[in-house]
Image: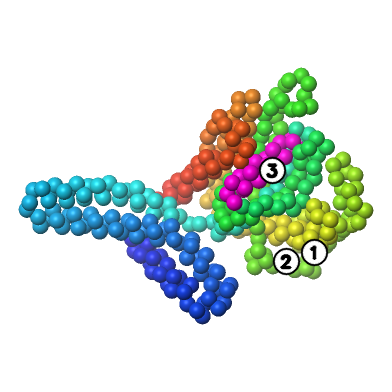
Amino acid sequence: MLEKLQAIEDKYQELEAMISDPNVMADMQRWQQHTRAHARLTPLITAFRTYKETLQAVTEAREILAEESDAEMRELAKAEMEEHQSKLPEMEQELRVLMLPKDPNDEKSVIVEIRGGAGGDEAALFAGDLFRMYTRYAEGRGWRTEVLDGNPSDLGGYKEIVFVIDGDGAYSRLKFESGVHRVQRVPVTESGGRIHTSTVTVAVLPEAEEVDIDVNQNDLKIDTYCASGAGGQHVNKTESAIRITHLPTGVVVTCQDEKSQLKNKEKAMRVLRAKLLEKAQAEQHAAVAADRKSQVGTGDRSERIRTYNFPQGRVTDHRIGLTLHKLDFVLNGELEELIEALIATEQSEKLKQME
């Protein structure tokens, strides 16, 4: 492990030299690429350097013990050596975690699709609750949220809403949210006070840059139509809404959120690129599906992942068996405890696979 870490540190020092090189700085794209690579390695290199300092302290204390005859000095050296040695196992575990293969999409922004499933109006209302939960979580991290497309329901929720969360590392935090979210509560439309169970499907896609996915304009069928609001009524008389069909794959995206046809097309293309990237990666991953099936789950949007039980005020994540009795806090965007537990489980699974 130490040889591999030393090689990574050598690479880190090369990157430091390159991002200070005027010739590299003149090429902004190249400079940004090296800067991002340097930033990704910084936590690992910082931990490695601290580990090396601790190893050196152990070695120096051991040398004093071997050479020193004074009892008091030997006692001090022994205490120092034991103190530093006790830190090494935890440091080594941290280094192993930091060396785990990174998902290449982790640093990307995300496109989130939320759709009401079983439960009709109640599912649409809960889709609205989840949309607010994610936007509040994003706000707490200083990320920007932008609605790409939405189909509001008559009662105030969403039959479907698609939005982007723009921020460094958004995918690394939110990728575990893909799947079926189940809600158990008394609907506002229920006069008898009975608890109903409804479902909402969430899909989290890493946003694809144009360099990630090359979309041939000749492969696109673009239709325009009048945007409609809740209940199906037309909200304007101009054909500003856009439907794009990618003919080779059959992927269809729509956008009617903006009054401008051009803006709707730009937003629809962002969703299309993300869907085509997801499709391409899913085909690549199919060959190594066993590697993806960890305890955290497959990321499949059909997998039931979480239950929100209102009468008991609890949230249960079924993939890791974690129950939190703080439903109000979670729906207010306080997702860190859930997300950290999911990340820790994924890291643990990866470490087992490397053993």
Which SS does the magenta portion mostly show?
helix
Q: Which amino acid type is marked by label 3?
A: Phe
* Depth check, front residue: 214 or 33: 33
Q: Secondary structure at mark 3?
A: helix
Q: Which amino acid type is marked by label 1?
A: Leu
Q: Which amino acid type is marked by label 2?
A: Val
Q: Find the distance from the CA under tag 1 to the CA under tag 2.
A: 8 Å
Point out residue 204 in the picture as x, y percentages from the top left corner.
Answer: 65, 49
Question: Label 1, on which residue?
Answer: 220
**Which quadrant of the view contains residue 271?**
bottom right
Q: Is residue 179 visible?
A: no
Question: Label 3, on which residue?
Answer: 131
Figure check: 120 above or below 255: above
* Depth check, front residue: 354 or 44: 44
Residue at (88%, 43%) from the top-left corner?
232
Q: Is residue 263 left or right of residue 68?
A: right
